[in-house]
């Protein structure tokens, strides 16, 4: 899977155009996740996830104003990679795009993650509670975000286990790579709050996640 994603990224580099940036971001993200699942290649995984965040961020300039998948994808990538030097700056960038007040639930999701990454717990809890009331947004993810904001370790543990189960139960994955990437991003945020959960082993989780730089 890694070689496939690396080849897709290289193909995008060979055809420079704004439309290729998202494709390259997707491929880089897939390559990073594939390397995490292989194990023992943390530095390479971190590098590819950083590339994914960079390409998605660059693509924003050429995107419609409601392309909220790009900031959430970029934030998740650097959180999973443990790229602490980039997380705060990228979170501020996401907030400057208006994610917290976006009409889209994905925009609000990006805003909540950004606020949590910056330790703005009260604001994050307010936005997360709004996500809980949003039809169509995964309730287990909203519950996990709200629990992190509230410093509720038992509530977070129960919610993130439900998120993990939802990944184990699905058939479709980003880039066709079966990885519970949302769980990994949530765990990174929970670690910043001091309430990361001891997850059970799962076929959609790597055996090891890169530690922060």
Image (cartoon, rainbow, N blue to C red):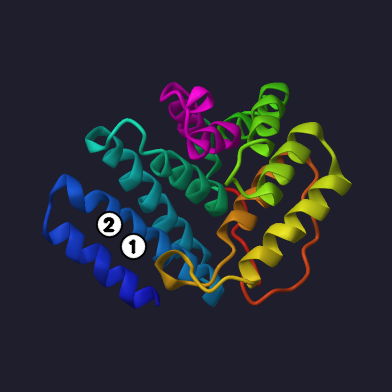
Q: Would you call the spot at circle 1 few (<14 residues within 10 Å), some (14-19), or many (20 or more)?
A: many
Q: Residue at x 55, y 41 (%)?
A: 84
Task: Name the residue nearer the viewer: 68 or 116.
Answer: 68
The correct choice, above or below, for 103 with respect to 62 in the image is above
Q: Which residues are magenta?
A: 89-113
Q: Quadrant of the N terminus?
A: bottom left
Q: Residue at x 79, y 42 (%)?
A: 194
On the image, which quarter does residue 149 sit in? top right
Which residue is disc 2 drawn over? Answer: 23
Secondary structure beneath label 2: helix
Q: Position of residue 69 (x, y in %)?
A: 42, 44
Q: Position of residue 47 (x, y in %)?
A: 41, 56
Looking at the magenta stretch, what is its main secondary structure?
Answer: helix
Relative placement, left or right, of 90 versus 201 is left
Q: CA distance from mark 1 to mark 2?
A: 6 Å
Marks 2 and 1: in contact by CB < 8 Å? yes
């Amino acid at each position: 899977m890694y070689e496939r994603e690396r080849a897709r990224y290289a193909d995008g580099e060979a055809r420079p155009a704004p439309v290729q940036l998202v494709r390259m971001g997707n491929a880089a993200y897939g390559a990073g996740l594939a390397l995490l699942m292989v194990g023992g290649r943390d530095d390479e995984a971190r590098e590819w996830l950083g590339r994914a965040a960079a390409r998605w961020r660059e693509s924003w300039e050429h995107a419609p104003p409601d392309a909220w998948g790009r900031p959430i994808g970029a934030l998740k990538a650097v959180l999973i990679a443990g790229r602490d030097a980039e997380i705060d700056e990228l979170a501020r960038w996401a907030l400057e795009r208006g994610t917290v007040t976006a009409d889209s639930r994905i925009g609000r999701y990006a805003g909540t993650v950004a606020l949590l990454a910056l330790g703005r717990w009260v604001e994050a809890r307010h936005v997360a509670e709004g996500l809980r009331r949003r039809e169509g947004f995964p309730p287990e993810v909203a519950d996990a975000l709200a629990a992190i904001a509230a410093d509720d370790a038992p509530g977070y543990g129960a919610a993130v286990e439900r998120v993990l189960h939802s990944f184990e139960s699905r058939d479709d994955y980003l880039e066709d790579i079966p990885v519970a990437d949302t769980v990994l991003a949530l765990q990174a945020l929970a670690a910043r709050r001091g309430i990361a959960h001891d997850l059970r082993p799962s076929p959609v989780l790597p055996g090891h996640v890169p530690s922060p730089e």
